[in-house]
Image: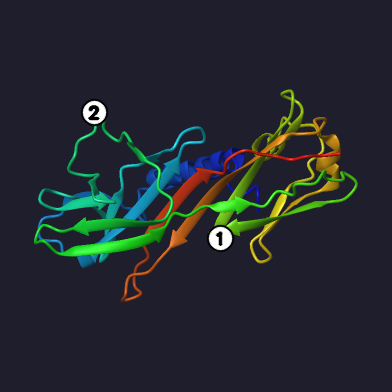
Amino acid sequence: MTKSNLLPSRITIQHFAASALVAILLSGGACYELPTTIPSIGIPVADIVPNYWLRESRDSCEMAFDQPRFNLKSNSNKRIDLVFPAKFTFQGKDLVTRKSETAGEPFILPCENGNALFTIVDNSGGERVDKLNLRKIELKIPQTPIDRSQDLKIPIGGNIYERMEIETTIEGSSIDDGYNDMLMNTEEYKGDRTPITFDPKTKILTIPTQVLKRIKSNRPKIQLEVKNSLYYEYPDKHSSPWFQYHYSTPKQTLNLK
């Protein structure tokens, strides 16, 4: 589970998708129609399907909110441009009618840690409010020195989502002293590929003894990068908006023997 959002896989998927698109276009595009954008005028809020993506900084308490995308529920190949007075807000902050200096530039907001409100208002004043929980997971690191001769099992508390992916980084005293999910799964990596794993059912993060033994430091820092993907349905069950939230846990010290 710790590997599924790694960059090499993402590149492979994007490359495949691009190749497939080229093949379709060369064949005349008989089965593919490019999405078109239409203004929100006259479209009720019940027919607007939002996609949200939040990324929280590793080093400071701020979030990047990518420009949200809205699709037409009755025709998924139609994208909607919210035209004033239609608007979209996050925690009461307008994120659409306010213009960025650069097209497509994300909005930078203070980080949140609790229930967040996403509100869409259509041109007739109709309103839709989605509530999402942005509370984070918590590592329960043992306080006593950890024996490297057996697997270390760390309970994870806090907000656990059904669709949650974790990448793990352990930093030692030098660049080569530690563990990094992303680097370990590149083609260039020649070392031991024993992974750190997370079981969402038991809520346990397992660091195998092979990983512990190759860390030279006695007090390395561990940090998790978390990606939550949520699919939540409209009341009529016909369409599912999509929300993704990326954040990192604070660094904590592992006390190893």
Q: Which residue is mark 2?
A: 101
Q: Which mark is residue 233?
A: none
* Residue found at x 72% / y 30%: 188
Q: Position of residue 192 (x, y in %)?
A: 82, 38
Q: Which residue is mark 1?
A: 160
* Residue found at x 65% / y 49%: 2
Determine if residue 34 is in view.
Answer: no
- At label 1, counting other C-alpha atoms closer than 10 Å, the crowd grade (few under 14, some 14-19, many 20 or more) is some
Of residues 131 and 104, the one nearer the viewer is 131
Q: Quadrant of residue 99?
A: top left
In this picture, residue 165 sits left or right of residue 87: right
Q: Position of residue 134 (x, y in %)?
A: 44, 54
Q: What amino acid is found at the position of numbered circle 1 in the picture?
A: Ile
Colouring used for the render: rainbow
- Rounded to the nearest angstrom, the CA distance separating label 2 from label 1 is 36 Å
Residue 109, above or below 216? below
Q: Quadrant of residue 72?
A: bottom left
